[in-house]
Image: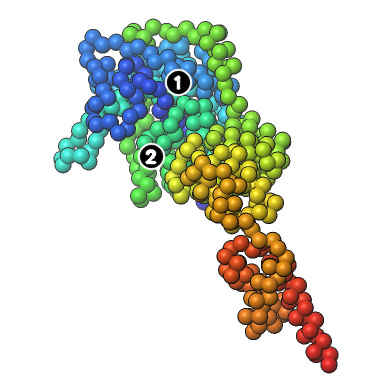
């Protein structure tokens, strides 16, 4: 991207669609969000737009949206209204989508994007509004025909529109990732990207580096993973650099991304707003939002991830990256804080959670809220490794066990005889045996082949069935080798 670095800079703005966690749909009583339902099982007359049906706004969706607005310090409308956005598509039975246009629920706000070195960048959020999702056209179920599934029709969506404040594909992907983390933290969304719970459209244009004008933007539709977002933007920026450098211009259009080829291709020219013929939905009168509703929501807000992150750095001395990773998910942050308080060792706690617990969770493909290790268990484990009762390897093995069972750690240690052996004589005897059995390697050790120590330690661990305290083993080996060295030089002096 060298041409890009010197001549052009990218300007990126995101439109993020978040499926809200509600029991029923945005305007009907049909069950929402059951991805296992048979096609069209969760679509009632309202969702299917039968004549004479009327929409009724879901209050939980409204509350969810205000919660998000509060989290980004957005201006919450005192009156918001719903408008019809008209377009034709087979999966849109009414011929229009109920959305918000002139009076969105949440006006301008700000999201503080976090970077690995701990600094942040304010990304302005232009607006956040409620709208309904469309049904789904299924092209691969029957040969030569498309079938329609309306289970998704009417699912509540929160649409978050940023200002074009992002400058690189990586920044855009981090922004999506962190907003994804925020909406899960707030309990608004399942966050399941593979089920389409969060989908992102990315708008990107180029301008001469340093300029403050705006070029023609293309809109990349429906990117449903951080990686796709990043790769689609990378490809698209390259494409626009080539066009502009060759003296051509970029056409404002909507493009789709194909993850298989890694390329984007034109879908349609960009719609102008007037083509949607927005007008207030006469079935839904403007919604007043009282001061009390707003202040009740404000006072029920949890501590936000960014606040917790900063607090972890300040109060527990974590690095920014540790604090960031621990606050991507609320259950992780809670486990960290509770454990660190019990064992009074925040560093060890962060290392165990981000290391072994996270690795085990990956192997089990579990969600953060399903981590079945309690703060008490984890803090005991950390203490037993620190006081030398357990070797760190045995400790790691036990993480799995603690997850699977509710057993008390000390009970496991005693009944299974897992106690690490720190008896000096015992350890020295094992070390001596290993040195004896590997005499031919000792000169190499004496010549400073430090790596060989690992092999020797490994041998001692083997004959001790993993129970020797590895630190003592190393000490014992070093002492023995020192002795050999002295004998050696004494012999040479003879
Ligand atoms: P609309 O056309 O719907 O009024 P815009 O096209 O201005 O809205 O904005 C839609 C999205 O595109 C926003 O996320 C905005 O930040 C982004 N955007 C607007 N202009 C540009 C641009 N020149 N380059 C990149 N992104 C842009
Ligand atoms: Mg929209």
**Going by the image, does 87 lie left or right of 483?**
left
Residue identifier under label 1? 129
Residue closest to the eye, 274 or 434? 434
Residue at disc 2, secondary structure: helix
Residue 266 location, x and y as percent? 34, 40
Q: Is residue 299 left or right of residue 486?
A: left
How many residues crowd around disc 1 within 10 Å: few (fewer than 14), some, or many (20 or more)? Answer: many
Q: Residue furthest bottom?
A: 494
Question: In the rendered view, would you say 203 is above or below 281?
Answer: below
State the residue position of label 2: 194
Reply above or below: 194 against 55.
Answer: below
- Label 1 or label 2, whichever comes before in sequence order: 1
In depth, the one of 89 and 353 nearer the eye is: 353
The mark tally for this picture is 2
Name the quadrant containing residue 199. Answer: top left
Which image quarter: residue 479? bottom right
Q: Which mark is residue 448?
A: none
**Residue shown at 72% from the left, 80% from the top:** 447
Q: Nearer the viewer, residue 451 or 145?
A: 451
Residue occupying image coordinates x 17% and y 39%: 142
């Amino acid at each position: 991207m060298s041409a890009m670095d010197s001549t052009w800079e990218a300007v990126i703005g995101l439109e993020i669609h978040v499926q809200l966690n509600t029991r029923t749909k945005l305007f009907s009583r049909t069950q929402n969000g059951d991805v296992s339902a048979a096609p069209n099982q969760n679509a009632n007359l309202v969702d299917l737009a039968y004549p004479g049906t009327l929409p009724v706004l879901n209050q939980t969706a409204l509350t969810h949206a205000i919660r998000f607005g509060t989290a980004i310090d957005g201006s919450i409308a005192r009156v918001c209204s719903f408008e019809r956005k008209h377009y034709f598509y087979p999966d849109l039975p009414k011929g229009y989508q109920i959305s918000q246009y002139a009076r969105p629920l949440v006006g301008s706000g700000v999201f503080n994007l976090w970077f690995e070195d701990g600094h942040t960048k304010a990304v302005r959020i232009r607006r956040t509004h409620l709208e309904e999702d469309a049904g789904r056209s299924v092209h691969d179920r029957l040969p030569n025909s498309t079938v329609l599934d309306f289970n998704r029709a009417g699912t509540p969506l929160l649409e978050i529109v940023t200002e074009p404040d992002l400058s690189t594909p990586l920044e855009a992907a981090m922004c999506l990732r962190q907003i994804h983390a925020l909406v899960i933290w707030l309990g608004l969304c399942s966050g399941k990207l593979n089920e389409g719970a969060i989908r992102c459209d990315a708008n990107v244009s180029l301008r001469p580096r340093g300029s403050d004008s705006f070029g023609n933007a293309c809109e990349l539709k429906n990117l449903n993973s951080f990686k796709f977002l990043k790769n689609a933007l990378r490809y698209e920026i390259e494409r626009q650099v080539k066009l502009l450098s060759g003296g051509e211009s970029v056409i404002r259009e909507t493009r789709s991304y194909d993850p298989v080829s890694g390329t984007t291709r034109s879908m349609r020219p960009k719609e102008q707003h007037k083509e949607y013929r927005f007008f207030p939905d006469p079935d839904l009168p403007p919604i007043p939002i009282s001061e009390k509703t707003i202040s009740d929501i404000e006072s029920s807000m949890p501590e936000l991830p960014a606040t917790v992150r900063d607090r972890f750095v300040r109060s527990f001395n974590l690095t920014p990256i540790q604090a960031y990773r621990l606050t991507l998910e609320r259950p992780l942050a809670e486990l960290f804080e509770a454990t660190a308080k019990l064992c009074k060792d925040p560093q060890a706690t962060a290392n165990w959670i981000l290391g072994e617990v996270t690795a085990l969770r990956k192997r089990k493909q579990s969600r953060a809220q399903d981590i079945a290790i309690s703060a008490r268990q984890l803090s005991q484990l950390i203490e037993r490794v620190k006081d030398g009762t357990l070797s760190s390897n045995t400790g790691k093995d036990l993480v799995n066990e603690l997850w699977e069972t509710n057993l008390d750690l000390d009970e496991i240690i005693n009944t299974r005889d897992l106690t690490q052996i720190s008896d000096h004589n015992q350890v020295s005897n094992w070390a001596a045996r290993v040195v004896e059995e590997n005499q031919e390697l000792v000169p190499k050790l004496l010549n400073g082949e430090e790596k060989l120590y690992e092999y020797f330690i490994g041998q001692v661990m083997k004959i001790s069935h993993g129970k020797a305290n590895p630190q003592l083993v190393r000490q014992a080996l070093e002492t023995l080798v020192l002795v050999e060295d002295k004998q050696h030089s004494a012999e040479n002096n003879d």
